[in-house]
Image: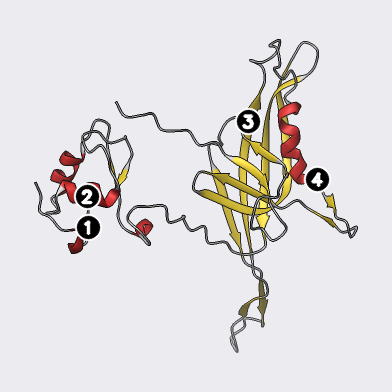
Amino acid sequence: MPAPQKLEKAQLLEIDSKFKDPLPGGTQVSVQFNPETLKLTYANQLNTSGTGDQKGGATTQFVGAGTTKLAAQLWFDVSSQTGQSGGADDVRQLTKNVSFFISPKTQADKKVIAPALRFQWGAFQFDGVMDSLEETFELFSPAGKPLRSSISFSMTQQKILRLDLPDASPLGPGAGTVPMTPAVAGQSLQSMVGGAGTGVSWQAVAQANGIENPRLLQPGQLVRLDLSASAGGTAG
């Protein structure tokens, strides 16, 4: 049986003011439950000049670098921990570090800035500052302590970000731009390659995709079937 895949947990990381590296000793939060959706919004700063009448059309010009915004919702719940030794009895014990990122920081030069923040979830990474946060308490204990909450937040980066995937593919640079086929439950690489009819051997496909167990693929596993001539081989 193949080993179960590790579940990546989303993280909020305090990073340096240049938006490059995690800040040593900075605040870090691992979410309790991964978000269901992530929303990206791109906006350009535009200026329209001219009247737009019959003598001449209006002209639109870029007046700024634009912005990219990420919005997400996180859930936290301590209802199952209440009464347990060492367990949290107030959900705010888990969410206070998330609220940290909306709180301004005073630097040594007395300048007040927002903490630089990185949202990272597996291969997805977004750097910016948190510009809004809303926490809704959903469940309370008999003593009136909040046990469950949802946090909706948004982050902004002052430029249009190209969220390129890191080149972690064994196919090499540009692998994310080629067609990939998802495997279905119980499918072997041999049957997948044979059904594609590309004329490439399953051994070549296995080598190019870094597949160690061709007899059983993970459901949804993406496989590049259309290899270049240099990948070589004939179906078999």
Badge 2 crowding class, 10 Å Cα cut-off, few under 14, some 14 to 19, many 20 or more, is many
Badge 1 crowding class, 10 Å Cα cut-off, few under 14, some 14 to 19, many 20 or more, is some
Looking at the rendered image, the disc whose residue lies closer to the viewer, 2 or 3, is 2
| Distance between mark 2 and mark 1 Cα atoms | 7 Å
Label 4: state its secondary structure. loop
Label 2: state its secondary structure. helix
Which residue is label 4 attached to? 103
Left or right? Give the position of 174 relative to 136: left
| Distance between mark 4 and mark 2 Cα atoms | 51 Å
Which residue is label 2 attached to? 205
Which residue is label 3 attached to? 75
Instruction: Please name whichever residue, 203 or 145, is drawn nearer the observer in this view of the structure.
Output: 203
- The percent coordinates of residue 187 (x first, y second) are 22, 34
| Distance between mark 4 and mark 3 Cα atoms | 20 Å
Q: Residue at x 11, y 54 (%)?
A: 199
Badge 4 crowding class, 10 Å Cα cut-off, few under 14, some 14 to 19, many 20 or more, is few
Label 1: state its secondary structure. loop
**Label ID, residue 202:** none
Q: Check contact, mark 4 vs mark 2: CB within 8 A.
A: no
